[in-house]
Image: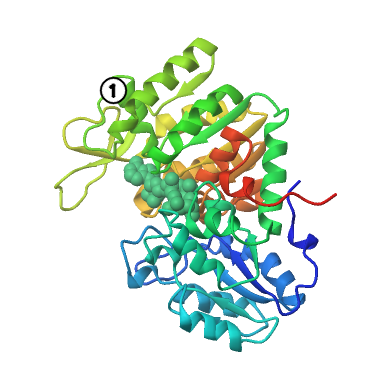
Amino acid sequence: MKRTIKDLVNLKGKVVLLRVDFNVPIDKSGRILDSTRIVEALPTIRYLIEHEAKVVVMSHLGRPNGYEINKSLWQISLFLMSKLKCKTYFVNDCVGEEVKERIRTMENGNVLLLENLRFNEGETTCDMNFAKKIASLGDIFVMDAFGVAHRKHASTYGVARILPNAIGFLVEKEAQVLDQVLTNPKRPFVAILGGAKVEGKIKAIETLVEKCDTLLIGGAMAYTFLVASGIAVGHSMLESDAVVIAERILKEAANKGKKIVLPIDHIAYREGDKKQRLIKTDRLIEDMVGCDIGPKTIALFEKEISKAGEILWNGPLGMYEEKKFQKGTTQIAKTVALSPAYSVVGGGDSVNAVNKSGFANKIDYLSTGGGATLKYIESGSLPCLDVIQEKLI
Ligand code: ADP
Ligand code: 3PG
Ligand code: MG
């Protein structure tokens, strides 16, 4: 059992470096479209405030290439401020003298949010010199960024290896729920996969095939699988390097008697069509770009969902950010929500899409992890949780 923040004593005056995942969907002007990941981190932040720690909150946002103003955490700090009663500061850096000075002068029980960690390239390469610089800011490290706990980055894996540490309430809750999902799931266990981060998620599908009975694949993920089954996908988003893995997964599933259901029709447009007229099509040929699953696919997926005992869903089934490509995701969200099966939906975009559909309150569990949830299911743990100290018994 991992040490949790409840096991930390004498927090008063201690500088606690709290890693959260505030990688929330935002629009072009930086407006937060879904605050679930921030709201879910609040119990840990409030606990540390109540115990009079100096709370230094750190996160990434998106995948910036150096500094990008629209990926600054400044907007997020304004939202955080509105949710907390204490003073909440922001600095536009995540290491260095200015940050140290701000921490030195802040009072116990107050919060400081650092700038996007990924503006520094040492973050994603897990540069231990960068990790040391972060660690030098504080006394204790608390890992509550479940959504990014599958990534060995400087502020997650690196800092945990340097400072005394513990997990926060969110990570504790996520791990407990996922352990339950994996132990004796009610059958048929139906997994729904979509989204765009194919490369990072496809390996987890190999394990999912073992654990679940039926796999419904939509979103950009589907095109890699369609190509692996010899079906044309036009100019849809494709992860060419992952086609071999998809082929292997399809073969293994067939050998094990597991069902993989791929889209049989699509909502698409033709590349170069300035008006982007929508096409409802069974075949994606030439310059067609598939952006959502079509009505026949929705019906096919619904048939499988209606039989499910348990459902796990990650990844929107279309480019749900645009209204015209929302139907597949929204309709499936409704079907999953109204099904009597135990349902878990995970991922920043997936949770946003389900919230948008208006059926989120009927989903049994909304997880903040997308790739992390799949990785947890694949290996029963996550690299950044493995490095957290065990509870002293
Ligand atoms: P999550 O955040 O839930 O883990 P991902 O980040 O993997 O999900 O994927 C979300 C993204 O997938 C969205 O931005 C959505 O537009 C994109 N997407 C879904 N379907 C398609 C598609 N057919 N083509 C391109 N992108 C897609
Ligand atoms: C996510 O949104 O899945 C997490 O914040 C991790 O983001 P990443 O895939 O860019 O590492
Ligand atoms: Mg996402």
Front-lying residue, 328 or 28? 28
List the single residue furthest toward the top.
Answer: 255
- Residue 218 location, quadrant: top left
- Indicate the colouring scheme: rainbow
Relative horizontal placement of residue 103, taking residue 278 as reference (left or right): right
Q: Residue at x 74, y 79 (%)?
A: 52
List the single residue furthest toward the right.
Answer: 393
* Crowding near the residue tagged with mark 1, few <14, some 14–19, many ≥20 C-alpha atoms within 10 Å: some
Q: Is residue 83 visible?
A: yes
Front-lying residue, 235 or 180? 180
Q: Residue at x 43, y 57 (%)?
A: 127
Residue 389 percent coordinates (x, y)? 70, 52
Front-lying residue, 112 or 348? 112
Residue 161 percent coordinates (x, y)? 59, 55
Instruction: Name the element at disc 1.
Output: loop
Relative horizontal placement of residue 54, taking residue 201 as reference (left or right): right
Relative horizontal placement of residue 93, taking residue 357 as reference (left or right): left
The residue at which mark 1 appears reads as 231
Front-lying residue, 6 or 343? 6
> Which amino acid lies under the numbered mark 1 shown in the image of this protein?
Ile
Q: How many marks?
A: 1
Relative horizontal placement of residue 132, taking residue 198 as reference (left or right): right
